[in-house]
Amino acid sequence: MTALLRHLNTAVGMTRSLVVYYGQPWRRSALKTFYRDLVSPGDLVFDIGAHVGSRSKTMLSLGAKVVAVEPQPAFADLIAKHFASQLKGFERVAVGASEGEITLNISSRHPTVTSISSQFIERAKTVGSFSNVVWDRQIKVPMTTLDALIARYGKPAFCKIDVEGAEAEILKGLSEPLALIAFEYIPAMPSIAKESIDRLALLGDYRFNRVVGERHQFLYANWKNADELLSDLSDLTADSPSGDIYARLRLVE
């Protein structure tokens, strides 16, 4: 792929993301309402996989102190240019199980599925909803851990993780439970969610809920334990919509 074509694909991908996350004001309003019950003014929050910064900006609007993490150069540049000065911290790094360096697999046309997880990419190639995705570029990026971020900024009240298949690896780099964690689940790749849930169960006594798609409302009236959630996820089909799993320490219920 030529540099010009890659640049055009990146522009198309970025425009799509900006339209999805900023061009639908009713969704942004729903997200703010949803987060208002989870994030209080003055709370420290981590946005791991900040992308175009939609969730970071929403949490900033609620008075939270936000640390945004985004390794993709195009989106990191966007954050740096437009609102990094409002953040408590901004890190242009990947997050994983250990500190060092890792390969970032970039999809210029579909940047939301850029990932450090080669396992995720191999699985995605077998899933119909990813049939049009091409990972056309690889770059080396520095990698840190949640423990290292906590040592630098403090322990967050909420940590949102959206990293396309690397969620369990990120949680391996966390040695203490956090009050509230959110991470993506994809029904067509159930083992990724299970690995993350199993890891959280080792860290603390968590209860779980989930959000389907971009609906910004919890699915369950009562939060479930790990076994109940895994049973519920096992009933989903491969073409069920993805969403976010929220894990909350039982002590803060």
Image: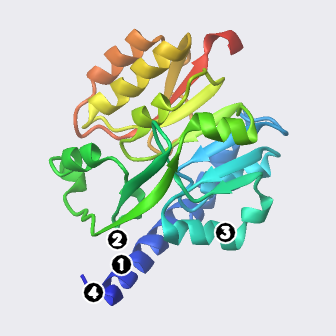
Q: Earlier in the sequence, mark 4 or mark 3?
A: 4
Question: What is the three-letter code of the residue carrying label 4?
Answer: Thr
Q: Earlier in the sequence, mark 1 or mark 2?
A: 1
Q: Secondary structure at mark 1?
A: helix
> Is residue 180 left or right of 230 when viewed as pictured?
right
Residue positioned 78% across, 44% down in the render: 64
**Label 2: few (<14), some (14–19) or many (≥20) C-alpha neighbours in 10 Å:** many
Q: Quadrant of the C terminus?
A: top right
**Foreground residue, 40 or 165?**
165
Question: What is the three-letter code of the residue carrying label 3?
Answer: Ala
Number of disc labels: 4
Q: Nearer the viewer, mark 1 or mark 4?
A: 4
Question: What is the three-letter code of the residue carrying label 2?
Answer: Arg
Question: What is the three-letter code of the residue carrying label 1?
Answer: Asn
Residue positioned 39% across, 41% down in the render: 166
- The image shows residue 227, relative to residue 89, as above or below, that is above
Q: Secondary structure at mark 3?
A: helix
Residue bearing mark 1: 9
Residue bearing mark 4: 2
> Is residue 51 left or right of 101 when viewed as pictured?
right
Q: Earlier in the sequence, mark 1 or mark 4?
A: 4
Q: Residue furthest left?
A: 126
**Label 4: few (<14), some (14–19) or many (≥20) C-alpha neighbours in 10 Å:** few
**Residue 34 in view (yes/no):** no
Contact check, label 1 and label 2, Cβ < 8 Å:
yes
The quadrant in which residue 196 appears is: top left
CA separation in Å, label 2 and label 4: 14 Å
CA separation in Å, label 1 and label 4: 11 Å
CA separation in Å, label 1 and label 2: 5 Å
CA separation in Å, label 3 and label 1: 21 Å
Residue bearing mark 2: 109
